[in-house]
Image (cartoon, rainbow, N blue to C red):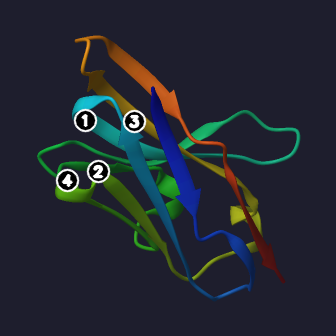
Amino acid sequence: QVQLVESGGGLVQAGGSLRLSCKASGSIFSINAMGWYRQAPGKQRELVAAITSGGSTNYADSVKGRFTISRDNAKNTVYLQMNSLKPEDTAVYFCNADLVTLTWATVDYWGQGTQVTVSS
C-alpha cells in the first residue's frame, strides 16, 4: 500500500505565505512526477505545479512567480511554497504522485487534500 500525507494548509491573509508538504510512504520502488492540484468550490480540479524526478517543473499561469514546487527524492516528499497569496488561491490542495510500486505497477496516487484559505 502507498500513502500520500499532506500538511501545511491553513488560513492566511492576502499577501501571506504558506508551505505545503506531501510525503509518500509504503511499497514504493520509485516516484516519477509529483504535483499539486487544487479544487475550489464549484470548480474542477486543476494543476497548480508539477515536478519530475529530474527536477523539471511546470506551473499554472495563475501561480507563476508566486509559487515554487520542490522535492526531496531521498524523503519521497514534495513541497509547495506559496507566496503573495490571493483570495482566489483558496481551495483544497491535493498532492499527486505517479509512482512505481514494489510489485512493478505504475499507479497514480492522491493525497487526502489540505484546505488553504486566503482572506482578503
Q: Earlier in the sequence, mark 3 or mark 2?
A: 2
Q: Quadrant of residue 101?
A: top left
Quadrant into which the N terminus falls: top left
- In the rendered image, which residue does mark 4 sit on? 73
Q: How many marks?
A: 4
* Discs 4, 2 touching: Cβ within 8 Å: yes
Q: Earlier in the sequence, mark 3 or mark 4?
A: 4
Label 4 to label 1: alpha-carbon separation: 8 Å
Quadrant into which the C terminus falls: bottom right
- In the rendered image, which residue does mark 3 sit on? 97
Residue 69, above or below 25: below
Q: Residue at x 47, y 54 (%)?
A: 61
Q: Residue at x 66, y 69 (%)?
A: 9
* Discs 3, 4 touching: Cβ within 8 Å: no
Q: Earlier in the sequence, mark 4 or mark 1?
A: 1
**Three-letter residue code for mark 2:** Asn
Residue 82, above or below 75: below
* Discs 1, 2 touching: Cβ within 8 Å: yes
**Three-letter residue code for mark 1:** Ile
Secondary structure, mark 2, is loop
Task: Tell me residue 40's x, y (percent).
Answer: 78, 48
- In the rendered image, which residue does mark 1 sit on? 31
- In the rendered image, which residue does mark 2 sit on? 76
Q: Is residue 41 left or right of residue 24?
A: right
**Three-letter residue code for mark 3:** Ala
Disc 3: CA contacts within 10 A as few (<14), some (14-19) or many (>=20): many
Secondary structure, mark 4, is helix
